[in-house]
Amino acid sequence: MGSLGRDVAGAVGARLGYRVVWRDLINQAAARAGQPELALAAIDDLGLLGLNPPASAVESYNQAVQAVMRELADAGNVVIVGRAGQIILRGRPGVLHVRVVAPEAVRAGRVARHQAISLDAALAQVRASDRNRREYLKRFHHCRWDDPDLYDLVINTARITVEAAADIICSAVARGMPFMADSNTGDETTS
């Protein structure tokens, strides 16, 4: 939250002519799992809704997320934002994993300005979002979200603009970096 990752993904998608997938992935997976209420639980980054779906529904949803994500990657020309793409598509040829970060204070300032709320309220939102995302990866994928081995690029938007971040990512794709060596699809994933 506040790192501008979705903005970077949108800029990359626009430049490359790729589809950008974020919440629509959640909705597709929830529908496929037959659990539409899980879409709400999945987008509740702050944990405000207090939704506690049964474990079987969550497992069905997570399997559906993985299936939808793999299908999107198979189709190619897609930027997938979040939902553990760095793990689900790990080691897959033609996939670039990008983590977009910024210091907590910078992110909280952005959220405060965007939502016209106090800095303290924004900081609480950023911390709650971070906690929920960190716990999601730990619980369902048994890994740390900040493990640098999960990413090909880490971009700090406190120091690099959205446009510059998109330039870096698009340049990596255009130059056929090693992640592209065994693929013809041109897939890309950003987290």
Image (cartoon, rainbow, N blue to C red):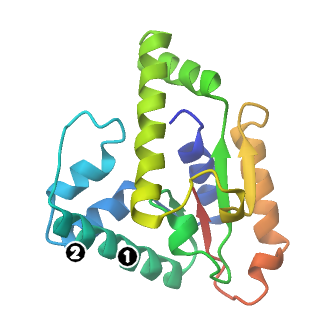
* Horizontal relation, residue 17 to residue 122: left or right: right
- Which quarter of the figure is the C terminus placed in? bottom right
Tell me the element at label 1. Answer: helix
* Horizontal relation, residue 104 to residue 46: left or right: right
Q: Nearer the viewer, residue 60 or 177?
A: 60
Q: Residues within 10 Å of mark 2 (few under 14, many from 20)?
A: some
Which dot marks residue 68?
Answer: 1
Which dot marks residue 153?
Answer: none
Position above or below: 64 against 81: below
Q: Where does residue 40 sit, x and y in percent of width and height?
A: 22, 49
The three-letter amino acid code for the residue at tag 2 is Arg
Q: Where does residue 50 sit, x and y in percent of width and height?
A: 19, 38
The three-letter amino acid code for the residue at tag 1 is Val
Q: Residues within 10 Å of mark 1 (few under 14, many from 20)?
A: some
The residue depicted at 43 percent of the width and 37 percent of the height is 129
Q: Where does residue 107 sit, x and y in percent of width and height?
A: 58, 27
Residue labelled with disc 2: 32
Q: Nearer the viewer, residue 20 or 190?
A: 190
Position above or below: 140 against 111: below
Q: Where does residue 27 sit, x and y in percent of width and height?
A: 27, 61
For marks 1 and 2, the one nearer the N-term is 2
Q: Are marks 1 and 2 in contact (CB under 8 Å)?
A: yes
